[in-house]
Image (tube, rainbow, N blue to C red):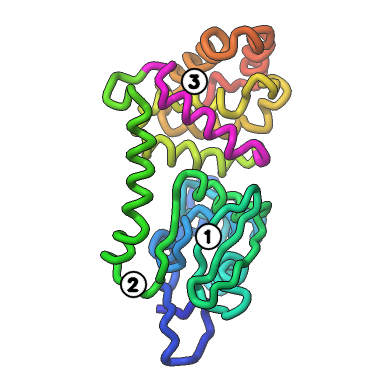
Amino acid sequence: MLTIPSGINDPSYRYKMPKMTLKQESRLNGVKTNIANIDDVASALRVPSISIMKFMTSELGANMEQTSIIKGKHTYADLLKHLDKFIEKYVLCKACRYPELRMKMEGKDLKSVCNSCGKTNSHDGLHKAGKALVNHLKQGGGQATDITQSRDIEEEVNNEPEEQEIDDDREQLSDIDEEFVYTSRRIVKIIGSIHDYTSEDLDDNDFVLQLLEEHQQNFKVPQEFMYFIALCGLFPPNRNPVKHWSKNEKVFIELVRQEGKVGKEHFMQAVVLYFIRQYNSELSKYAETFMYTLLQENVLNLQ
């Protein structure tokens, strides 16, 4: 175990986190570094793991894959250095220096209140890590009020309200137990969420993919609906899909890659539905040009 942050030599210091476990993976498209226990580290810091990953990839100038992999070969020392920087920005109180923060939103500002000394802290909500924390809070995510409490007490204090909020949210979606259709309230809700959470960072494809994965798991959405959700969330009526396609092409390439040949079929179904069913009045004029763009860029023949 390491102290939070690392390097504190006081034997009585009680704030601890697990040491990162790294696995170097070499594949056809290069070397990658997998932080295998990122969820455990994030749990100890009481933040979503995506916020740590977004911070590290931003600082390293690297791309992220899945939820725990950073492209490139990175040493433990380098990653620990950046983890400590993340802790400094988003975990430690600026007054008492204890990791006792409770994150909250005040308007559009990301702030926290220290459970130890009571100070209100301001944080960088424009950094990719800050945006991930904002997204977590918007989805009802929270933190335990005392990092030293037992897991049972933490769940009672924090997770129960979070679960209740999710349950209340799902109760409002009347089709939760019914067969999925493209007009299901769940689908409409997720589309709105994707656009809201990415409105200031629409070109961050890794972030978009992470949001899609989280929503798919939370609402148990079948894979074939994810293409339609991504299209509508990334290209609402005020964002020309032809003009901006190249900026988000990676999202759909990755979705197709995950499903293989059937993914191409699902993608094409989503394109047709996108123009005909969802935004036909505003965006149907782009349909022909959009299809031509896909053919030109060979998107329909993804391997």
Residue 268 is tagged as none
Residue type of the residue flagged with mark 1: Met
Residue 267 is tagged as 3
| Distance from Cα at disc 2 to Cα at disc 3 | 47 Å
Decide which of 284, 58 is in the foreground and name it: 284
Residue furthest front in the image: 118
Tell which circle, 3 or 1, labels the residue nearer the N-terminal end: 1
| Distance from Cα at disc 3 to Cα at disc 1 | 38 Å
Location of residue 38 in the rendering, given as x and y in whole percent from the top left corner: 43, 61
Location of residue 177 in the rendering, given as x and y in whole percent from the top left corner: 27, 25
Q: Estimate how packed mark 3 is, as few (under 14), some (14 to 19) or many (20 or more) residues with alpha carbons within 10 Å.
A: many
> Which is closer to the viewer, label 3 or label 1?
1
Question: Which residue lies under the disc numbered 2?
Answer: 149
Kindly report the secondary structure that dominates the magenta region of the rendered protein: helix
User: In the image, is residue 196 part of the stretch drawn in magenta?
Assistant: yes
| Residue 192 in sight here | yes
